[in-house]
Amino acid sequence: MNTKVLKCFQTVYEERSISRAARRLYITPQGLSKNIRQLEEELKAVLFVRTAQGMEPTESGRFLYERSERIVRQLEEMENGLRQLEQRKERLRIGCANGALNLLPLPVILKFGEEHPELRLEWREYPNDQVKTKLMDSEIEYGFVIGEWSGQAVAARMITGCRICLLVYEGHPLYGRERVSLSQLEGERLLIMNESFRLYHEFTALCAVQGVTPSIVAKTADGAGLYRLCSQKVGLAVAPEFFREEFRMDGVRALPFEEDLYWEVYGVSRRDTSGYENIRLFDQYLKEHL
């Protein structure tokens, strides 16, 4: 039994059709039928019955489907872990939380690849929680995440960070203040990064704790969009302080929060793989250059 065959089974179960499942999996119906027969022979169980309505799962089929997701995940973790072990001297995959590269100097990371040509350096941006999932599933070796991540299975340390500020346009009653509190945002039209960014979740969670109901009128994945909308007086923007360095800030001020909100980037790896040569070299390089 392997993950490929189990995924074929899952797809047929969900689609109730060999032809639809085959299209979804980008394989031929004949090849998919063969995979299902092989799985039934291996398990010595009938998983589907062909009817006029399609592939009807048997009791055994329903039993397997209910447990197959956990089995597939465990098999994938083992396969990924073994592949990671075998390629620890050949490849380094890095996952960056959306927005983290605004504070991380990418040239420093790329320079590491130049100094270690024996390692194939791969990096990609993901939502914050996906970086964590991919790290624990052995799909990446190192991650940059937003916010502290503690746990016995994870080695983490803060790399860099900045304050979270409120961008206020000229003419707004808060424009002349030096700091602003969350309570002053009640009823204000707010602009913020969307749900793919940890900033959104942390800010809304803190508002809930403070008893503030934020009126979010726009969410974006584009930091420049926050500044542009704020300067157009659409609303006040919640944004990391580094945005102030990227724009001219004509008619816009960045006010820190009295609650001292921070946006921090942590470098993370799994403790059980932190001794791998590729991870150890990269972590040491970060300590020396950042």
Image (cartoon, helix red, strand yellow):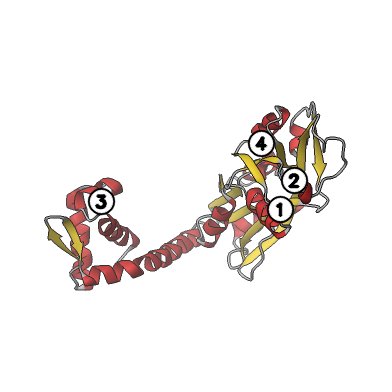
Residue placed under numbered mark 3 in the picture: 21
Query: SS at mark 4?
Result: helix
Q: Amino acid at mark 1?
A: Val
Q: What distance separates the C-alpha of mark 3 from that of mark 1?
A: 47 Å
Q: Amino acid at mark 2?
A: Leu
Q: Position of residue 83 (x, y in %)?
A: 46, 59
Q: What distance separates the C-alpha of mark 2 from that of mark 4?
A: 20 Å
Q: What distance separates the C-alpha of mark 2 from that of mark 1?
A: 8 Å
Which residue is at the front of the view, 131 or 188? Answer: 188
* Left-right relation of 278 to 163: left
Residue placed under numbered mark 4 in the picture: 223
Measuring 25% from the left and 51% from the top, which residue is drawn there?
21
Q: What distance separates the C-alpha of mark 1 from that of mark 4?
A: 24 Å
Q: Amino acid at mark 3?
A: Ala
Q: Quadrant of residue 228?
A: top right
- Name the disc covering residue 185, or none: 2
The mark closer to the camera, 2 or 4, is: 2
Residue placed under numbered mark 1 in the picture: 212
* Left-right relation of 122 to 169: left
The residue sitting at the front extreme is 187
The answer to whether the residue labelled 2 contacts the one labelled 3, judged by CB atoms less than 8 Å apart, is no
